[in-house]
Amino acid sequence: MKITVKSWFKSGSPWVWMNAGAVSISVVMVVGLLALIAVRGLGHFWPASIMTAQYQVPGQSTQVVMGQFADEEEIPTQRLRDAGIQGFEEQDLVTRQLLKVGNRDVSGSDFAWIIEPWLDNIQYPEDAIALERREWGNFYGFVKEVRHNGAVVATGSEAWDALNASIERALTIHNDIYKIEKKDIGAINSKLERLRLQQRGLELKGEATPVALADIEAQRAELNAAYQVLEKSLGELYVSFTRDTVVAETVSGQAVEINVSKIVRAYQPNAMGLGGKIAFYGSKIWEFVADDPREANTEGGIFPAIFGTVMMVLIMSVIVTPFGVIAAVYLREYAKQGFTTRVIRIAVNNLAGVPSIVYGVFGLGFFVYFLGGQMDALFFPEALPAPTFGTPGLMWASLTLALLTLPVVIVATEEGLSRIPKSVREGSLALGATKAETLWRVVLPMASPAMMTGLILAVARAAGEVAPLMLVGVVKLAPSLPLDGNYPFLHLDQKFMHLGFHIYDVGFQSPNVEAARPLVYATALLLVVVIAVLNLSAVAIRNHLREKYKALEV
Amino acid sequence: MSEQSIQSAPGVNFDTPAVLRYRNVRKIKDKTARYGIATGGLGVIAAILLIFFYLLYEVMPLFQSPEVELERSYNMPVASANSLYVTMEEQAEIGMQVSSAGEAVFFNTEDGAIRKTIALPVEPGVTVTSAAPMAAGNNMMIAGLSNGSVIVFKHEYRITWPNDQRLITPLLTFPYGEEPIVLEAGASLDKVAVRDAEEQLIVAGASGSDLFMVRFLKEEDFLTEEITLEREEVSLPFSGAAARSLLLEPDLNWLYVLSGTDTLTQIDIRSGQPFVEKSYALTAGKNEVTELQLLLGGISLLAGDSNGRISQWFMATNAAGEDELTEIRSFQQGDAAITRIIPEHRRKGFLALDAEGVLGLYNTTASRQVMTLSVTEGVVDQAGLAPRADALVLGTGNQMHLWSVENEHPEVSWSALWDEVWYESYDEPEYIWQSSASNNDFEPKLSLMPLAFGTLKAAFYAMLLAAPLAICGAIYTAYFMAPAMRRKVKPVIELMEALPTVILGFLAGLWLAPFVENNLPAIFSLLLLMPFGILLFAFIWDRLPLNVRTVVPEGWQAGLLIPVVILVAWICLAISGSLEGVFFGGDMRSWITKDLGISYDQRNALVVGLAMGFAVIPTIFSIAEDAIFSVPKHLSYGSLALGATPWQTLTKVVLLTASPGIFSAVMIGMGRAVGETMIVLMATGNTPIMDANIFEGMRTLAANIAVEMPESEVGSSHYRILFLAALVLFIFTFVVNTLAELVRHRLRQKYSSL
C-alpha cells in the first residue's frame, strides 16, 4: 500500500507518532539520567591505570606527565585559539583529556587538561604507585625507600612491601587513636559538660550548697584524672604513629618524603590483576558507605550522612504515622460529612503542593525560634545563652518534614478507608461491637496497606527533600552522630548530616569541585538507590498485606 | 420478640455484674476513642492551618503603623537657651547635652537627674558657640568656640556589670588631643563640621559669611604606630550671604554650604585649592531652606523648607552625562517651616520637626512618610534621637520630654517592594534586590520584582519544555498505547517523580550546564531534528509492507521510537562540532557573546528550563493522563463508529472533554515549578537580575529564601520580608492548586453524569 505524504498527514498518523515520540523522549530521559548517575557513580571506585607520557606543547620543552585518566572531551579548536594556544589552525575539533595528576602539594592542582595529539610515548609502568593521603589528595609516583625514625630500612623492590607493612601498622594505630579521641575522650567531655550544666543549674536554683558542689568537684576531678591517663597514652600512640616515612619520587624526578601516618591506602593499579581490581573496588565501596568523610568531604565515605538521613526519616515516620492516621480516621469515620469536611479535604490535598521551602521557613520560625526558644527558657536555663533546642536540629528537622509529609499520609489513608465497603463496618456493628472496636479490629487492619503506602510515599519524599532541611538542622559536617553511647544517647538537639544536602554542599560549596565530583555522583547514586529500595520494599510489604486482607474485601 | 427470646434463653444471663462492668468499660473506651480521635484529628488540621497563620503573624509587623508615646517630662538639665546639642547613648538610658558654657552634661533620660558633668578644655571667658556630630551614628563631635578654635572630642560609654547590674559610665575622649585647634583666631564660629577619614582629618567652620577649613594629613609612625597630624591651611572660595549650614561629605570630595534663602554651594575640596563646583537653588527660589542635613552614609542631602517640604538630593548622572545634585524625592509634612531634621543612625530614615510642633517619621528608600504626630504646640528647641531609633528626647522651653518610638520596619512599603526605586548612587530608579552588605550605612534594596520575575522566568522556560512533552505523552499513553506497554511506562514516569530534586539540580549544575555550553549547536539542532527524525521514521514505517509492520502491534510506536530518539540525539551531538565550525566561527558560545552581543552565563535559564522541565513532566503527565484515560469509552466508540479516524476522535471528542483536566494538570505543574528550590539554586548563578534572556540566570523567590534565610537576623525587616516571600509562594500555590482541584472535581462529576 503506497501512501502519499498528503494523505498520510490527512490520516492524522504523523501526530500520533509525534505523541508517541514524546513518551519515548521522556523514557529515554529518565533511563539516560539513571544510567549517567550509575556509570559515573560506580566508575569512580575502579582503580584506573596510571599513565606516564611525554607531553610536548609546541614551542615548549617536553614535560613528563603522570596520572589517572578522568575524562575526555572534544572541543572546538577556536576555543583553544581564544585561550592563546596555537597549533591547530587546520582542524575544527581536537580531543583533550582530563588527567588526575594528583600531587597537589608539589604541583598545586589535582587535575590537568591534556591535549591528546601532543601526547607521546604513553606507558603504564608496573611499579607506578598511587597513595591516598589524608591531606593534599592523591600522590602518584614511584617508591624509593622506606624509613623508620629517619633510618632507611628498605629500598628498591623491597620498599613496596615495607611500605605496605608500614601502612598496615599505621592504620592499626590510627584506629586506636580514633577510638580514644572519639569514644573515650568524647565520653569524658560529654560527662564534664553535663557536670558543668548540673552545677550551673544548681546555682540558678540557689541550691549550690558546698556539699553538692564538692560532690560535683569530686566527680570532675575523677574525670580529669581519667582524661590525663588517656591523654598520655594518646601522646605515646602519636609518637609511634609518625615513626615511618616513605620517600617517593614524582615522575619528574622530584623526591618527596611522606609520613606514613598521612597515608590511607597505597596501590599499584598497573600491577593489579582483574581479581585484585575487583577486591580493591569492593574495599573502596565499603569505605564509601562505612567511613567518615576526609578532606572537606571530598574524599572518604559518607557514613554520617547516611546515618543522619536514616535517623531523621525514622523519627519523622514515628511522628507522622499516628497523626496522619488519626486525622484521616477523624475525617472519614467520625466527622460529619458535608461542606466543612470537603473544604478540609481540598486544603489538605493542596498542602501537598505547597513548596517545601515554605515548610522550612515555617519550621525555622515556629519550631526553632518560637518553640525551641520557649523550651530552652523552661527546661534548659542552665545552658543559656547557648541554645539547646533554640537552634536548628534533628528534632525540628524531623518535625518539619513530618508536617510536610502529613498530607501524603492523610490522603493515602483516607483513600484506603473509603475503599472499605460499608457492609463490613455494619456487619461488625450489628454483631454488637462498639464503633471503636470496629475501627480497631476491622477497619484499621483492612486499611493498613493504604497507611503503609502513605508512609512509604512520605519516607521517599522526606529522604530526598533538602530545601527545608537547609533551614532547620542540616550541616555540612557534624562532629558526632546523633545517636551514640553518651547520655542521653539520642541527641535530638544535635545538627546532623544528610545525603541530599551532602550532594548540594560537596557539589557546590566545596573548594575543590573537580576532585569532589565523582564522590557526588556516587552519593547521588546511593540516594537514588535508597529511595528506590525504600519504595520497592514498601511496595512489597503493601502487596503482602493486601493479599492478607484480600479475603475480607470480597 | 427478641428480648423475650434472650430472656428465655436458658442459663444465659446478660446482666451479671461482670458483664455489666465489661460493657461499661467498652462504653468508656468507645467514648475515649471518639473524643480522642476527634481532638487528634482537629488538632492535626489546626496544625496545618497554623502554617498559614504563623507566616501571616510573622509578616504582619511589616504593615503595622509605628507608635510614638510620651513617656516622661522633666526639667531640662541645661536650659534651652544654653543648650547647643542633645543626644543619647545606645541604650537610651543616658542623654548628653552640650552647653554653651563648655560642659558636656550627662543625665538620666528617665528623670533628668544629672549623672556627670565633664568640662570641655575651654579657656575662661570663651564660650562654645556651636556643636555638631561628625555624622549620624558617629560619636565624634566638634564644638566651635567664640575665639575661633574648635575642639574635637568623642562621647563614649563604658558598660560594666557590678553585681550583675548594668552600669553605664559616660566619658569624653579627645582622639587628637585636648588642645583646641585654632581655625581662625578671633572669629566666633557659628557653624562647624568635622570629618575624620582614613588619611586625613578635616575641620571646617563658618563665621558669618567667612568660611575656614583646615586639613590635617595623618602620618603613622611605622614603629610606634602613633599618628601625627600635619596641618595644612586651606582657603575656601566662598562669597555670599552668611552660611547657615556647613556639611562635609564623608568621602571628602565636597563641602556643602547653605546660604541665602535656598542657595547650596558645592565646593570641591579634593585638592589643596578648593573651588566652587556648582551652586544650586534648592527650591528654585520659591521658599527658604530652613534645615539641611546629611542622611546616614552622607550620600544624600535632606533639605527642609519654610513650606513644610523636605527634599532628598544626591549626585546622579543626568541625561547629558554630567554628575549633578538631583532632587530624588520629596515629602510634604505640613505647611509650617521645617525646623529640625534628625537622621537615624542605622537606617536610611529621618525625623523632621516643624514650627507647629509636628513630628514626622520618614524613610527615604521606601519613599514613605511613616507617620506624623503633633508633639507640642510650638517650636521644639532641642531634639535628640537614640542610636537604635527607639527613643527621642524633645526639649521645649525648659521642659524635656522623653518619647518612646516603636518604628520597626519603616523601610518596607508597597513601593519599596514592587516599584522602581531610585537608590543612592544610582542614576535612575531601578528594581534591585540586594539585602545586605558589609558596611553599616548600606541602603538595603528590597525590591521583590527581580525575584518574582526570576520565578516566573524559570517556571516559564520549564513549562516550555514540560507542557508539550507531558501532554503529548499523556495523550499517547492514555489513548493509543497498548495496555501492556502502559503498565511498563507508568512506573518509569512515577520513578521520574520520585527522583529527589537535589539530584536533578546537581546534574543540571555540574553536568548539564557545561555540557550545554560545549554543545550548544546540538541542543538547538535537537529541537529541529527530533520532530523531523520522528516523522521521517514514521513515514518510512507506514510505507513498509504490512507483514513487516504487523510484527510490532499497534500501540507500541513509542517503543519503536526509542532507538530513533537515541539515534537522532547521537547524530546531533556528533555534528555539533562541525556545525560550530561551519556556522559559528568555531565556537557558538563566543559567537553568541561576541557577534550577537548577548551575555551568556554557564548556569542559565536554558539549563534550568531543561532540569526543572524534567521535574515537572511527571506531575503534569500523571494528572493529564488520568483525565484523558477516564473520558468515558462510549464517547470515543461512538465517534469511531461514525467513521472518524482515531486522531479525529481524539482531537474532536476526547481532548475537548478532557481539556479542563489537562488545564488543571498544567496549573499544578506550574505550581510545582514556581516553588521548586533546589534545582534553581544549583542550576543558576542566583543573581537577581531582570532579563528575559534565556542565556542568563535568575534568582527565584524560593531560592532566595534558601540562600538568605539562615543568615537573616530574627525579627529584622529582611527576615520578615523573607517570610513574606514564603507567604506569597504559599498563597500562590495554594490558590493555583485549589482552582485546579475544583476544575478536576467538576470534570469528575461531568464524567459520572455522561
Image (cartoon, coloured by chain):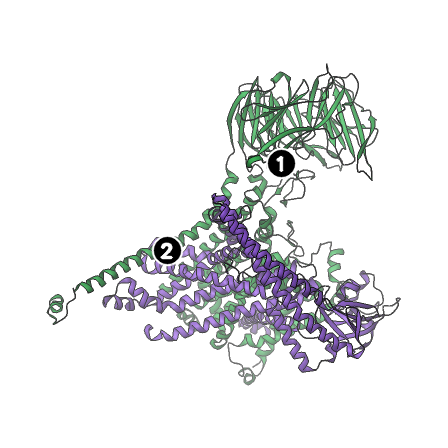
Chain colours: A purple, B green
Disc 1 from disc 2: Cα separation: 48 Å
Q: Position of residue B502 (x, y in %)?
A: 58, 61
Q: Quadrant of residue A41?
A: bottom right
Which kind of residue does numbered mark 2 sit on?
Gly
Q: Closer to the camera, A323 or B229?
A: B229
Q: Chain of mark 2?
A: B
Which kind of residue does numbered mark 1 sit on?
Arg
Residue drawn at the location 39% of the way across and 73% of the way down: A546
Q: Position of residue A109 (x, y in %)?
A: 76, 63
Q: Chain of mark 1?
A: B
Q: Is residue A388 left or right of residue B203?
A: left
Q: Closer to the camera, A415 or A516?
A: A516
Q: How many marks?
A: 2
Q: Quadrant of residue A183?
A: bottom right
Residue found at the very far top of the displayed protein: B125
Secondary structure type for disc 1: loop
Does residue A225 appear anywhere in the picture?
yes
Q: Residues within 10 Å of mark 1 (few under 14, many from 20)?
A: some
Q: Is residue B293 above or below residue A510?
A: above
Q: Are discs 1 and 2 both within one chain?
A: yes
Any mark on residue B554, and which? none
Q: Position of residue A242 (x, y in %)?
A: 72, 66
Reading the image, the residue beneath label 2 is B40
Q: Position of residue B746 (x, y in %)?
A: 40, 58
Q: Is residue B173 left or right of residue B486?
A: right
Q: Residues within 10 Å of mark 2 (few under 14, many from 20)?
A: many
Any mark on residue B346, and which? 1
Q: Is residue A346 above or below residue B176?
A: below
